[in-house]
Amino acid sequence: MSAQEVKQLPSHAIPEPVPDLGAGIAGTPRKPHPAGRVKHGGLMQVVRMLLFATWFNGCIFNMAVVQYFGAPLYLINRDYYYAYMALTKQSFGLLITTVTQWFSPTVVRISGDKSVRGQLSRTKDGLLQTDFPERLIMIANHQLYSDWLYLWWVAYTNQMHGHIYIILKESLKYIPVAGPGMMFFGFIFMARNWARDKPRLRHRLQKLKGRHGGPLSGSQGLDPMWLMLFPEGTNLSANTRKGSKKWADKQGLKDLQHQLLPRSTGFQYCLQELKGTVDWVYDCTVAYEGVPRDGYGQDYFTLRSTYFQGRPPKSVNMYWRRFAVSSIPIDDPQQFEWWLRQRWLEKEQLLEQYVHDGRFPADDGHDSEGEPAVGRNGGSKVIQGAGFIETEVKLARWYEIGQIFVFMLLYALVANILAKTWNLAVHGTFQGEG
């Protein structure tokens, strides 16, 4: 779909009803929600919440058991251990995709610049297909707590949902069940204290430069890896905006309206440690339809609104581009900080355009315009820009859900066989004593 063919539908928020305070007194109307009015009543919200909790927590518990059963592989065979944990990570990617597909159906509009030409496409079924490298660093602005969910789904469209690594706040690893699961995933936890964070970050990054054989080991020698980080450090909100503005004023920097000022230390260190093993930094600019200029997405798209009330974002919009690591001044702190700030100023312009026009720009040209072919696999084929791709978050095949439970079913089958074998040996019958 070309830029000329895309017509932005009106995204005017439906006004909320004015509350009646009784005695003929009308209350102050609430601000309109970008996704319209509540679509489900109180009882249905409770039902949806119970279904959500049952599915999500049941799958999380299943994955936790599978991870603990597989932990001894680390001492037996590292290749199979990492492949095993990659499969559990794939299962989580499938889980969050189903949660979005079933409880908060979301339209996603994707475009990019010439640097990702040939790497964004749409399948015959209308789903997104990406062709990014097996190893990259992914950065993005941080609008909502759930930004990572949509970026993980992008990894799914590239068959990389089992090889994604995220840098997170240290407090998250203490969440029961989920916290240890994220540690098995190899996620990196930061305490926002560089003296403490640097040694653990170095340790984790050294592991990400490893080479393992066996299943899911990739095709390039080095293990597949998508390292996701948010240079802003936290998501955009009224409080974090104040802190960012205060820092900008103190440092004499230009303040940003749609983002927070990025932090360069951790990102630069990642690039330095992974130098020679990663060729590209992929940047995604994310925007959510309907959030007003003076508003913040987190105030509208809460867990309750998105999954229980039936008010997810009308659309999630992504603009992709990439930068060669060789072109980034990763060894000069001041130059690197300037480089990163320039990228964020460019993202600010993109977000301003989105607020004004309701869409990001899109590349729908082709390589004959002077740009060399930039598809991951190279070749002489002329590559056409994807323009705008409108799709939705969903599984490509419904039966992929089975992968979430395949290990647990396998363990149950083995346990049943062992139990029957024991009963036969001890009691002379498959049924045991009695």
Image: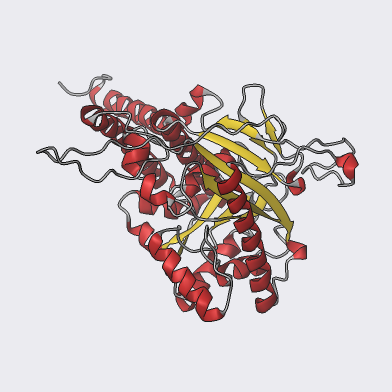
* Residue drawn 63% across the image and 31% down it: 7
Quarter holding the C terminus is: top left
Observer-nearest of 180 and 422: 180
Looking at the rendered structure, the number of numbered marks drawn on it comes to: 0
The spot of residue 283 in percent (x, y) is: 64, 53
Q: Is any part of residue 59 visible from this angle?
A: no
Seen from this angle, which residue lies furthest front?
24
Observer-nearest of 416 and 315: 315
Left or right: residue 27 compared with residue 37: left
The spot of residue 171 in percent (x, y) is: 36, 62
Above or below, 265 against 60 in this view is below
Q: Is any part of residue 188 visible from this angle?
A: yes
* Residue drawn 50% across the image and 41% down it: 289
Above or below, 141 against 413 in this view is below
Observer-nearest of 425 and 97: 97
* Residue drawn 32% across the image and 34% down it: 309
Above or below, 350 against 6 in this view is below
Quarter holding the N terminus is: top right
Quarter-of-image position of residue 281: bottom right
Quarter-of-image position of residue 383: top right
The spot of residue 268 in percent (x, y) is: 62, 69
